[in-house]
Image: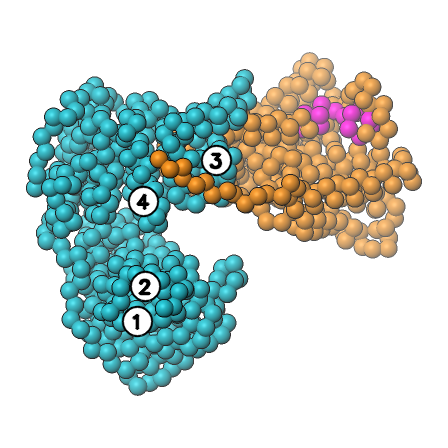
Amino acid sequence: MTETTQTSAPVPAIEARDITKRFPGVLANDHVSFTLAKGEIHALLGENGAGKTTLMNVLYGLYHPDEGEIRVNGKPIRINGPEDAISHGIGMVHQHFMLVPVFTVTENIMLGNETVRGITLDRRAAAKRILEVAEQYGLAVEPDALVEDLPVGVQQRVEIVKALYRNADILILDEPTAVLTPQEAEDMFVIMRELTRRGVSIIFITHKLKEVLSVSDRITVMRRGQVVGSTVPSATDERGLAAMMVGREVILTVPKGPANPGADVLQVENLAARDDRDLLALNGTSFTVRAGEVLGVAGVQGNGQTELVEAITGLRPVTGGRVTLCIDGKVSDITGAAPRDIILHGVGHIPEDRQKHGLVMEYPITDNLVLQTYNQPPFARGIVRDDRAVLKNAEERIAEFDVRTPSSVIATDTLSGGNKQKVIVARELSRPIKLLIAAQPTRGLDVGSIEFIHSRLIEARDAGIAVLLVSAELDEILSVSDRIAVMYKGRIVDVVSAAEATREQLGLLMAGVKP
Amino acid sequence: MTEAAIPKTAARPALSRQTTVWIVVGVVVGGAILASYATNAVITTSVMASALRQSVPIVLGALCGLFCERSGVINIGIEGMMLMSAFTAFLTSVTIGRATGDANTALAAAVIVGLLTGALLGLTHAFMSVTLKVDQIIGGTVINIIAMGLTGYFYQANMTTLGKFQPIALPLLSDIPLLGPVLFTNPPITFAALILVAVAHYVLYFTPWGLRTRAAGEHPRAADTVGIHVNMMRYANVMIGGMLAGLAGAFLPLEAVGSFERNMTNGRGFIALAVMIFGKWTPFGALGGALLFGLASAMQTQLQFFGLGDVIPHQFVGMLPYVLTIVVLSGFVGRSRPPAAEGKVYTKE
């Protein structure tokens, strides 16, 4: 761990001293101190739930700290709400954009700080100033566009202009790349460097290690509400940062032995289905998954992966083709069967959208862990639920799968993303399943949780379960799968062995080019 | 740095399908009215005037719902707000009339009391839904039930007023054939309702207040992060809405009938709610919907008058306004999108 000496900037742009923030049952920030020098990009790194966002919400006035002091340009200030933060030149781009979708860019940017003539909104004058600000910082925005029509990358640019429009010279970017494609993320880094060149200081919150190393000037790592250290990119690497974040050595690539594939478990033949807009999303998809192997489905988002998983699990009507399960020599046609029937056949499903389809957010963890089995022994005796068995099951699963929670009976909604996903994985793997369908199982998770979930997938494989992994992350596909099926426009264009596949080859296949 | 490409938004056609539909409907309806006027001027004029009168409480009620829902609060208590205000306005008109003997003073005081009653009920609804976080449907229902109960209990049949608002003919304008008697010869609340539609449109779309109100109803957290006090906006808008419902209520005893009767609003608050939704949460949409309903009501009366009730059971003729409104509005208006955060309590974390 390297402590850097501060010689470059005598007066920091913003300084948080000994910030403490408690929530019921959680110490979110425990005497956290953080300094942002003028004109630097300072990355704040940490796992989900480490307290990064809490600290930033304190700086932006959305939370009031229980203890501690904030100084801007050396002067102690009191921030009672976002309007105070804005007046001190602090701007924040939230992880979930704070833009009204049905408003235009101009309306969103001027909101709360409107340009008026008399009592009438002067949209034209505001748009002119927006273009001036945008040009000054080299950002391109279209003032009259409706925000809901814009791609996420552009919406993010609008958020940045919104902060600069309010004369912010300290920018807090909360996980700005989480919603971006790799190309959009590159553009974002160019913008960030350009902003610092023009005098803006940036706090960059993330848990992606590569990004931190490539873009930041300084790195501060948080773990469980505390600052565990500071360093500079030249003095560390991905392994070092991951270890600081998690508090132990982290294995970034999954260790696994060769697969021992058995008989075919899932057979998908010429499957066809339509998407939500009634367009053909699956157009003759065929593949098989064998017991004891991981079949990874790679592809650019929107080539039918979501529909494929939904069609197999009975969540989407099938318009053609067949899905057959062969478990212990027993063949059953599950095409268009009810989700419950499919589950009872021995299929586990880690859905793409864990908030919407994986968990009932208002339920306690105990109930979410028995969503499919609540009516079977030991959780039910006749028509009566056995609360003690449900509770015992939860305590065991929480311990076994390392779910970090103050209690097993709190609403699942209060858990961090990684812990929510662990609850789902715990539920699916604790049933006697023969096929596991994992859709984007590590999306938005931190390295610690990713490592955990990957190792569980491999364990499931080694236990003889057939695993179908659908992921947009090529690294994940390459490191976890045994065979890789590449999906393009609703079809599998090719199936290749993971050991022999290269990123370039997969990239070509994902673009529909078959060598 | 390289100029990042701005993806152009899809070009919008000069006239949306929506606008085209409205223009066609307007031309057809206008043509029908003119043809009817050429055939029988007296009846056409009276039907049109009646249509406008019937639509006044509906459009004011819809504006009430509009201000509430645009700020994020569902208000199904419009009916109750209207009924209660109608009652207090009537009582004021009776009492002040007795005390002063001057009809105009009594009516003016009655309007003010009606507005205040609406504002007070708006405050009640805001307190329940914003501060106490009561389910907003239940809050609105409470207001409806209370209004029904209190007005029914306290109403006495033998009260009389000195009179109701009389039509004012605007000079020159009222001499235009058809338009003059229909649009420009009206009592004050009717004029006020038409003006308020334009005012509401201006406030919602052209002032900072309207921008902030809509932001509170669409994405309250976004509004909060730029320093807008979401809950204060909601309180204020629900109270403004309450005053509009109060004016709608006051219209009934002060301008339409001249007296009060039990359950006088007779579902107009709910029709107003439907008209607001069909009007896509816009003031002029609400006006259009209300006028359509008013026209259908006026025609229904006229058809009964012509003896159609002898051929077809009169209950079926009585259904005309409701059926016509639903068919036309659901058939032509298409999908509408409510404010994204309506009905959702906003709490800072």
SS at circle 1 = strand
Q: Residue at x 45, y 33 (%)?
A: A108
Query: Which residue is at the far right?
Result: B39
Question: Badge 4 sits on which subunit?
Answer: A
The answer to whether residue B134 shows anywhere in this view is: no
Badge 3 local density, few (<14 within 10 Å), some, or many (20+)?
A: many
Disc number placed over residue A496 in the picture, else none? 1
Q: Is residue B328 positioned above or below A439 on the image? A: above
Q: Is residue A78 left or right of residue B99?
A: left
Residue A477 placement (x, y as % from top left): 27, 63
Badge 1 or badge 2: first in the primary sequence: 1
Spatial CA distance of label 1 from label 2 is: 9 Å
Label 3 in the same subunit as label 2: yes
Display colour for chain B: orange
Q: Which mark is residue A506?
A: 2
For the N terminus of chain A, the quadrant is top left
Front residue (pair B80, A201):
A201
Residue corresponding to mark 4: A186
Amino acid tagged 4: Glu
Dot 3 and dot 2 residues touching (CB under 8 Å): no
Which residue is tagged 3?
Answer: A142
